Image (tube, rainbow, N blue to C red):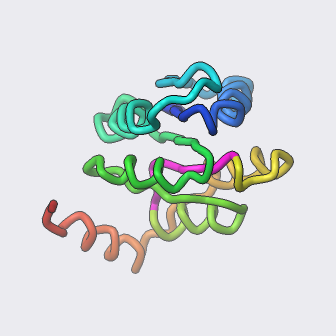
Amino acid sequence: MKISVGSDHAGFEYKEIIKAHLLTQGHEVIDFGTNSSEPVDYPVYIFPTAKAVADDKAERGIVLGGSGNGEAIVANKVRHVRCSLAWNVESARLGRAHNNANVLSLGQRMIPRGDLLTILETWLNTPFEGGRHQHRIDLIDQLPVG
C-alpha cells in the first residue's frame, strides 16, 4: 500500500518509527516532513499529506503531532479525506470499521510508545464494514462545503 505521512516537530519521533515500520512491512511511504524536532507550523506538512490521499497519490495517510487534534482538523479540510483521531486500539478500529477513515491522526504526547504500532496495525488492517455506515458517509459527502 502507498501511504503518505506527515508530522510537525511534536510528532516527528513517532513519524520516523511509523515510517520505518511501514517500510519493513512492504509499504511504499511518501514522507511530507517535517524532518526534525525543530518547531514548525503543522498545517504546512499535514495539508499535503492529506491532499496526496485525496488526489489518489496515496491510498492512506498518517498525520502526527503532539495531540493529533490540530492535525486531524487540517486533514479534514481536504475534500474526500476522512481523518480519524485515534488514541487507542478501539478508536483506531472504529475509525476504519465505521468511518472508512483514509487518514489517521496520532498524538505523540497522548499515546504510549509501546501502543503505537498496535494502534497503527489495527487501523491499517481493519476493513470498512459498509452497510449503514456507508449511508452515513454518503450523507457526509453530500453536505455543502462551507
Q: Nearer the viewer, residue 138 or 42?
A: 42
Residue 113 is situated, as x and y percent measured from the top left of the image, at: 82, 45
Residue 60 is situated, as x and y percent measured from the top left of the image, at: 48, 41
Which residue shows up at 55% across the image and 59% down it?
85
Q: Total of numbered circles in the picture?
A: 0
Residue 72 is situated, as x and y percent measured from the top left of the image, at: 46, 53
Farthest residue to the bottom: give it: 132
Which residue shows up at 39% across the image and 47% down it?
75
Q: Is residue 72 above or below residue 26?
A: below
Residue 56 is situated, as x and y percent measured from the top left of the image, at: 33, 34
Report the side of 22 relative to 133 (left or right).
right
Q: Is residue 136 above or below residue 7?
A: below
Verify whether residue 7 appears in magenta: no
Q: Nearer the viewer, residue 65 or 6?
A: 65
Farthest residue to the top: give it: 35
Q: Nearer the viewer, residue 84 or 74?
A: 74
- Residue 28 lies in quadrant: top right
Stretch of the chain drawn in magenta = 100-108
Q: Nearer the viewer, residue 43 or 96?
A: 43
Which residue shows up at 18% across the image and 69% down it?
143
Report the side of 144 relative to 20 (left or right).
left
Which residue shows up at 60% across the image and 24% down it?
38
Q: Quadrant of the C terminus?
A: bottom left
